[in-house]
Structure formats: C-alpha cells, structure tokens
C-alpha cells in the first residue's frame, strides 16, 4: 500500500512538473541552445543575414547567468516559505469560497463580456470587406492588411486593453466551468447556462484573436485553458496520462499549424512548408542572432537604467492618457530604448540584419537596461514566479488568473520581456479583483 501511494505521489509530482515554471525555463533554454548550435551557413541561406550567434560564448554566459539568477530567486521563495511554515502553527484549512464555482458571478461576468467581445468582433470585421477578410485568411492577400485594420480598431481609446482584459479572464472562467461540470450543480439550469455562456465567450475571444492575426493573441488562451484543465484534473486526482498526451499533442499540433498559417498568409507564400520552416528559424535562432549582435557591438541600441524592466509603469494603460509618463521616463533614464516594430527596425537595419524581424529575446532587453548586470532582475522574477506557482497549485483564484500569463512569459524568453509589458498591469488588476472577491 505504501509503495502504491508513493508511486501515485511520484506520478502526480511529475505531471505537476509538466506545467511548472521549471519546465518553461527548460524549454527556453533548449531554444537558446538550438540557436547557439544552429549551422551558420544554413541560417544565412534561410534568413539572409550574417550569423552572429553560432557558438557565441557571450550569449551562453549571459543566458547561464540569467537562468542561475532565476533559479536563485525560485529557491529563495521556497526557503522563505519553509521557514515561515516552520515558525507558525498549522491550522486546519476550511473551505474557501473561491474553491467553488459561483454560478451567479460566472453568469454576470459572461453577460458583461459577451456583448463587449461581440462588439470587438463586429468592429474588426467591419473594418474590411468580407471578401477582403476571406482573402486575407486564405492567403490570397497578405493577412498583414487585416492585422493593420484590427490594430486601427484597437488603437481607438483603450479598446486594446478591453481585449486584453477579456483574454485575462479566460483561465478563471475555464476553471469555474470545470468546477460546475464536476459538481452537483451541473444538472441545474443555471449550471447549463453558465457553462454554455463560458463557451460562447471563449468562441468570441477566439474569433477576435483570429481576426487580429497575431500569434500570441490566440495561442495564449489555448495554453491557459490547457494548463487550467490539467491543474484542475490533477487536484481532483482524475487526470489520465493518455488523455493528457492527447490534449498536449493536440495543443502542440494546433500551435504549430496556427503559427504556420499566420506566417504563410502574411507573406502570401506558395511554398507553405518551406516558408513556415524559415519563419520558425527566424523567430527562434534569429532572435538570439540579434542578441549576439548586441553583445558583439554590431547592434547598438540607446538605453540603460532599467526602462525595459519598468516599461509597465511608463506605458501603463489609461494612466498614460492623463500623464506624460514618457517625458518622466526620459528625465529619469536620459534615453528611452526602442520598443515596438517601427522603432527597432532602423537599429536592426543599421547592424546589417533583417529589420522585419524585431524580436531579440528577454536577455537583450535586460542587457540594454543593465549590461552584464542584467541577470539581477531575474532573481526577483524567479521569486515571483514560484510565489504565483505555489498559489496556483493551491487553486487561489488570483493565481488562476495570473499563473498562465507568468508561464507564457517564461516560454516567450526567445522573443521579448513579456513579464514587464504594459498588458501585465491589466492581468494583475484583474487578479487583484478576483482575489478580493474570494
């Protein structure tokens, strides 16, 4: 009996590890390793630019420093929690309101967000003719036209943050829907209506993301729903390995397929498989190639002082409409580093690289901010990541909202400093609101 219990506990720990921050960091390290080992001649033929990253010792050293700092922060949180748990007397934990689906709240949230999401879909769809949208989605015309139209809609007022807020609520709604389905309230009329409304809202969010033609806009909700489903089933002790394998493989195939589809339709490429492979190499190895060029001095970017790590403050949603935060940042940092496609292109072109590819890894952002001391913020990053992870495993409502975004930020190390983006403010505020309602 003890052996069986130990085996079951080991299996549970392994399955939890699959959706942990450690796994996401290992994934990002694997991408970095592939970039450093990728054949330079093949890269230059595929992407059409000089290779800087092949066997780059500075890149390896910087990544190792940052990952080690992240691991240190991660361990610091674990040690602190052990110390605190030893000092305080453990009391039996009673049921928390947030552990049970609150059907009226779910109904209310859905009834508010469904019209908003429908409005976003209609607004984006009406920005182009239906034939133009169909041509863009089928690849007859570049889907960048559709993406630009969607961004014009999002640029009006704070519409983009409304979309972010509806996306941020996805993990919490999925958790509540799963809770309703697993409880006795499943058979009630309110339960059926609540689950149906959650499905309608998720469909509208997927439609908006598809029309936006961004990769992360659709892939993040899919990842969030998958992670929440795995965590929920693990807490129930009802996750079968075969079902997990099918769900994981399905999500992976969907991610690769959607990435390829967007890449092909943007470029109107006829050689779909070859173009998808080129784009995948550009988005992974190419990002680290820009980082290597930055370390080598071939790519020069203004900055320093920490603007990228505090960009959530200087680009804060709504607040920046009333206060000139950029001027304040300019006075503090002296020079503001480039952010966004248009600003980075000129610097990348000047380094002799393809200016259409502007992602340059989280490590490049940290290097621009702090140089070779850029590993320091990763200590705080690791501490906070484990803080949210532990709360997520404990099914804290605020962590259910926040953890999938933290996990996504770790998976996106190859692209950007996601954890410090202005959109994180919306996620944190929503997590606070849900936590207060707990």
Image: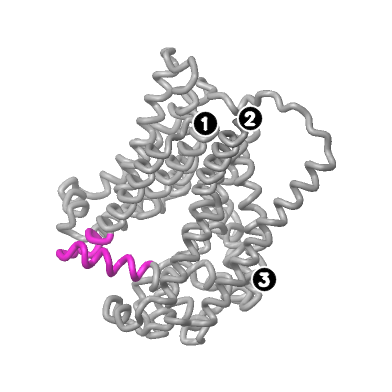
Tell me the distance, in whole angstroms, between the alpha carbons under discs 2 and 1: 24 Å
Instruction: Give how far across and how far down residue 407 sits, in percent.
Output: 52, 51
| Scheme by which the image is coloured | one colour
Tell me the distance, in whole angstroms, between the alpha carbons under discs 3 and 2: 39 Å
275 drawn magenta: yes
Q: Which of 237 and 212 is in front in this view?
A: 237
* Label of residue 161 in the image: none
Q: What stretch is highlighted in magenta?
A: 263-283
Q: Which of 310 and 322 is in front in this view?
A: 310
Q: Mark 2 points at which residue?
A: 438
Examine the image and state in which quarter residue 54 appears: bottom left
Q: Is residue 350 above or below residue 270?
A: below
Instruction: Give how far across and how far down residue 105 sits, in percent.
Output: 53, 24
**Residue drawn at 43 percent across, 44 percent down:** 163
* Label of residue 332 in the image: 3
Say which element carries label 1. Answer: loop
Say which element carries label 3. Answer: helix
Say which element carries label 2. Answer: loop
Tell me the distance, in whole angstroms, between the alpha carbons under discs 1 and 3: 52 Å
Q: Mark 1 or mark 3, which has the lower sequence index?
A: 1
Assign the magenta stretch its main secondary structure.
helix
Q: Mark 1 points at which residue?
A: 237
Q: In which quarter of the image is the C terminus?
A: top right
> Marks 3 and 2: CB-CB under 8 Å?
no
**Residue drawn at 43 percent across, 49 percent down:** 160
Q: In this view, does 389 lie to the left or right of 170?
A: right
Examine the image and state in which quarter residue 100 appears: top right
């Amino acid at each position: 009996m003890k052996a069986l219990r130990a085996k079951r506990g080991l299996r549970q720990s392994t399955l939890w590890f699959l959706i942990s921050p450690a796994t996401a960091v290992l994934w990002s390290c694997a991408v970095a390793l592939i970039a450093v080992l990728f054949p330079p001649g093949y890269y230059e033929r595929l992407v059409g630019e000089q290779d800087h990253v092949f066997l780059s010792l500075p890149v390896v050293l910087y990544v190792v420093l940052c990952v080690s700092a992240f691991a240190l922060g991660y361990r610091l949180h674990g040690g602190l929690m052990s110390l605190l748990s030893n000092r305080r007397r453990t009391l039996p934990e009673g049921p928390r309101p947030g552990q049970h689906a609150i059907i009226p709240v779910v109904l209310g949230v859905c009834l508010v967000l469904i019209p908003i999401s429908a409005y976003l879909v209609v607004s984006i769809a009406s920005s182009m003719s239906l034939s133009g949208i169909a041509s863009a989605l089928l690849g007859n015309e570049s889907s960048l036209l559709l993406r630009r139209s969607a961004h014009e809609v999002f640029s009006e007022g704070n519409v983009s943050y409304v979309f972010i807020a509806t996306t941020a609520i996805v993990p919490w709604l999925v958790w509540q829907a799963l809770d309703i389905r697993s409880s006795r309230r499943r058979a009630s009329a309110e339960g059926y209506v609540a689950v149906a409304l959650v499905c309608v809202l998720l469909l509208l969010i997927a439609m908006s993301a598809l029309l936006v033609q961004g990769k992360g806009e659709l892939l993040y909700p899919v990842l969030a729903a998958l992670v929440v489903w795995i965590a929920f089933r693990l807490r129930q002790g009802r996750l079968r390995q075969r079902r997990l394998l099918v769900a994981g493989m399905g999500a992976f195939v969907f991610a690769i397929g959607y990435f390829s589809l967007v890449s092909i339709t943007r470029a109107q490429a006829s050689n779909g498989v070859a173009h998808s492979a080129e784009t995948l190499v550009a988005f992974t190895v190419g990002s680290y190639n820009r980082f290597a060029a930055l370390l080598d001095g071939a790519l020069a970017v203004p900055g320093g002082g920490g603007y990228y790590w505090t960009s959530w403050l200087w680009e804060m949603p709504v607040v920046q409409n009333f206060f000139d935060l950029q001027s304040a940042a300019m006075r503090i940092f002296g020079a503001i580093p480039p952010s966004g496609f248009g600003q980075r292109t000129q610097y990348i072109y000047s380094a002799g690289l393809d200016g259409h590819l502007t992602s340059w890894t989280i490590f490049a952002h940290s290097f621009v901010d702090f140089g070779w001391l850029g590993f320091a913020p990763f200590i705080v990053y690791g501490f906070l990541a484990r803080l949210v992870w532990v709360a997520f495993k404990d099914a804290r409502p605020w962590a259910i909202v926040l953890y999938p975004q933290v996990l996504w930020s770790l998976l996106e190390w190859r692209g950007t400093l996601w954890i410090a983006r202005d959109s994180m403010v919306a996620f944190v505020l929503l997590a606070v609101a849900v936590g207060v309602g707990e």
